[in-house]
Image: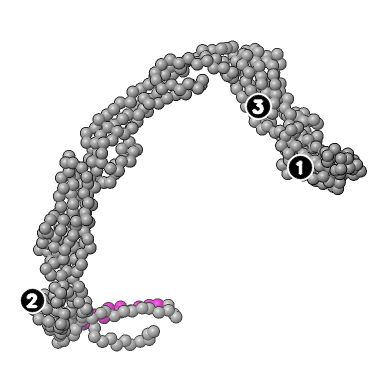
Amino acid sequence: QFIAASDSIAIRISPSDCQGLNGQFGMQGAIYDGCGGVALATHCNCNTSDFILASGNFTVGATYVMVLDGCAGDVCAYEMEVIYGSTSVDVNSLPPVGQIIGEEYTCIDAQPVYSVENYVAGVDYFWSISPPPVGVIDSTFQGSAVVNWTTAGQFQLCVQAFNACILNTETVCKDILVTNGPVIDSTYISLCQGQCFDLPNGQTVCEEGVYEVSLEHIESCDTFKTYIVTVSDAPVTYLPEQVSCGDHLTFCNELIDSSGSYQVNCQTSLGCDSLVSFELTLLNPIATIQEPGNLCLPGVLLDGTASQFSEGNGISRQVSWEGPPGGLVPGVDSLTATAILPGTYCLTVYEEKNGQSCQHTDCVEVKTIPIGIPDSVQLCQGEYLPINLSSDAYVSYLWSTGDTTSAIDVTSSGVYSVQTVDTAGCIHSATIEVIISNDLYTGLPDTASFCEDGYIYVQAAKGFSHYLWDGQFE
């Protein structure tokens, strides 16, 4: 045996003069964590030359057992040397005990088990009682002790760590109060309906009553306990039908995502479950308009038949369309309509039950086909702008001036618009702003500053037929 004085230790074994009994030569060996403990280092090959037993898992102050064996009963001489670490211990080499773990309150003839907080295999522990006559330490094992208390009063249980070389001068003690027993004790248990309670003897109780339990081999003086169990009924509350907007409802932390009959567990102020029973209707109408095409005569279809409505009885439903004045023509049913003017069209679906109303709206934009003319043009006084839309694709024209020809001459400032109808009946449109003035606006600032070797980006107003720049440009 040896006592570790460092975490890492290496021991060299040097066999010699092996006799080769039973046809085997050499030695093998191992280091164990105490007698019969875990092996920290092993060498299982039969060696006649030097071999090393080493580990980095030693605990300073613990006692370890090194076993050396001749292979198949061979007999060898040997020498050993500590080549790394230390086995030279002192009083500071023992690991700390920590606290004593166990009952602070116990009774006469009880046999509680106490143990050290920091148990280390390979370290022995010396237990003592102060004063000695009040109890008997029946047995000790692996840092624990069984104490049979024989006298009532306030006492101390103490422990010291030691090994074959030293006894730790530090003594750890725990105050223990020992009382006479046994004592009959009553415990009141309040359960909610449907709850159960496990008694110390393994019995599970779910109903009201008085239950007596005999506790054996306990570390306190309560030898007999009476459990008085009461059960609080879970009330059932019936609510009127619940109507809610949306695709779900959260009720007493339970998520409900469909209409139907429900019984939900809720908590009362006493902490017991309460059953709440109700019918639920979820109103979740969804309006959907299919994307329309460009506006063509006699109009473009607005199709809302993909809209969705909630399931259930007693639900009233309504549908309404909105759009530009004069632009809507009702369809064959409430979910379709025809747009004859460009603009924004919206479908709203409504559902109502028991005074709760829910709605949803979807909108689309009906557009004409744009005509490729400028958005704006600037002219000088005395000039005019001819606009010619002559094309074989158009069959009719309507200008904001009232003209119905393919071309007009603009001689005054203003905003002009035109709608044309092509051979397929589709409507094309355009708007142009014409500005006639002696003081034309170029869109350029009067002055601009920038850093040396820098640059500035400038852009003239649109609508001119020619541009002539004066300066250095890239």
* Relative height, residue 404 to residue 323 (above, below): below
Mark 2 or mark 3: name the one nearer the start of the chain.
3
- Residue 62: x percent and y percent? 75, 35
Residue 86 — which label? Answer: none
Q: Is residue 449 magenta?
A: yes
Which residue is located at x 44 percent, y 24 percent? 197
**CA–CA distance in space, label 1 to label 3:** 31 Å
Q: Which residue is mark 1?
A: 42
* Relative height, residue 118 to residue 109 (above, below): below
Q: Which residue is mark 3?
A: 115
Q: Which residue is mark 2?
A: 402
**CA–CA distance in space, label 1 to label 2:** 110 Å
Amino acid carrying label 3: it is Ser
Quadrant where the C terminus is found in the figure: bottom left
**Closer mark to the observer between disc 2 and disc 3:** 3
Q: Secondary structure at mark 3?
A: strand
Q: Secondary structure at mark 2?
A: loop
Mark 3 neighbour class, 10 Å CA radius: few under 14, some 14 to 19, many 20 or more: many
Mark 2 neighbour class, 10 Å CA radius: few under 14, some 14 to 19, many 20 or more: few
Quadrant where the N terminus is found in the figure: top right
- Residue 291: x percent and y percent? 23, 63
Read off the magenta span.
438-450
